Image (tube, rainbow, N blue to C red):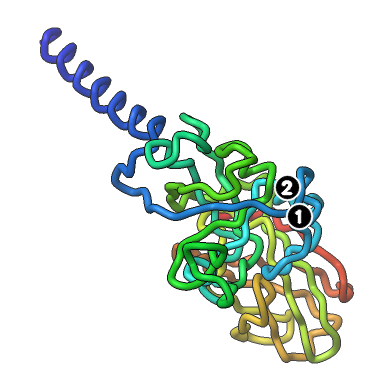
Amino acid sequence: METSAFCAGLLVLLVSSFFMSADVEGSASPGWTAASATFYGGSDASGTMGGACGYGNLYSTGYGTDTAALSTALFDDGDACGQCYRIMCDYQTDPRWCLQGTSVTISATNFCPPNYALPNDDGGWCNPPRQHFDMAQPAWEKIGIYRGGIVPVLYQRVPCVKQGGVRFTINGRDYFELVLVTNVGGGGSIQSMSIKGSNTGWMAMSRNWGANWQSNAYLNSQSLSFRVTTGDGQILVFPDAAPPNWAFGQTFTSSLQFS
């Protein structure tokens, strides 16, 4: 019995060592997809603020400097906003400019537009059908050497780990609620969303742009509840996320979070 247990443990150790070695060397083990990566935004990532997902100041909204703009093939018209990816430089393909044995987990916060004036193998890195990450410079320098400019990478979707609850920022005007949803854990992105006033039933919202969802109802002086479905199919209801005296421009933090 002891011999069998020892052999089983040794087998687990060998298998684990194999996959750890695959990660360190940057080989395309199962679950990883080949892509490429550049960087933008400066050494402090100040140039990454704002962006096509609508998160605004990435420092204050909690996304920090581990972020990236996604190419058309990955951005999916905003459906990917908030998704998290683990990225490592493909050292076996480019040992000159890749840092070996490192990886970084980034959040998708922006769109990298195509440049059809340049070929996709010489400057048009974000042109379809390329899968490309234009990473914030501090994140990129965790896996690549600055002078390389562009490197081959391997990536995989991973759950987003967030501190605190999901946040709702209510912008817009009467008869037009534009709700920005931030700090979304789990799948990170939002597939669908509904809103409910304290005097109404549930009403489907539509994506306006990025992580901003809109409703065309008059909901002033009503507490607001939200039902959110993430890109991986998790559903959470946020009852009375905003009190009846909410005002446009305010942000409300819930006590609930996706896993």
Residue under the point 11% across and 14% down: 4
Quadrant containing the N terminus is: top left
Report whether residue 202 is seen: no
Please tell me the numbered disc located at residue 58: 1
Residue at 79 percent across and 91 percent down: it is 175
Q: Position of residue 18 (x, y in %)?
A: 28, 28
Q: Is residue 19 left or right of residue 83?
A: left
Q: CA distance from mark 1 to mark 2?
A: 5 Å
Q: Which is more N-terminal, label 2 or label 1?
A: 1
Q: Is residue 251 above or below residue 27?
A: below
Task: In the rendered view, tell whether residue 154 sits above or below residue 50.
Answer: above
Where residue 53 appears, as percent x and y from the top left, is 67, 68
Check disc 2: other Cα within 10 Å, few if <14, some if 14-19, many if 20+: many
Three-letter residue code for mark 1: Leu
What's the residue at 12%, 8% (across, down)?
3
**In terms of secondary structure, where does tag 1 sit?**
loop
Residue found 56% across the figure and 71% down from its top: 118
Q: Amino acid at mark 2?
A: Gly
Residue 104 point in image, percent of width and height: 56, 40
Helix, strand or loop at disc 2? loop
Q: Nearer the viewer, residue 167 or 17?
A: 17
Q: Quadrant of residue 201?
A: bottom right
Determine whether, in the image, residue 208 is placed left or right of residue 242.
left
Instruction: Give 169 or 1, whichever is nearer the viewer.
Output: 169
How many numbered circles are shown? 2
Q: Which residue is mark 2?
A: 64
Residue 57 can be seen in this image? yes
Q: Which mark is residue 49?
A: none
In front of the other: 132 or 108: 132
Q: Position of residue 136 (x, y in %)?
A: 67, 50
Callouts 1 and 2 close, C-beta under 8 Å? yes
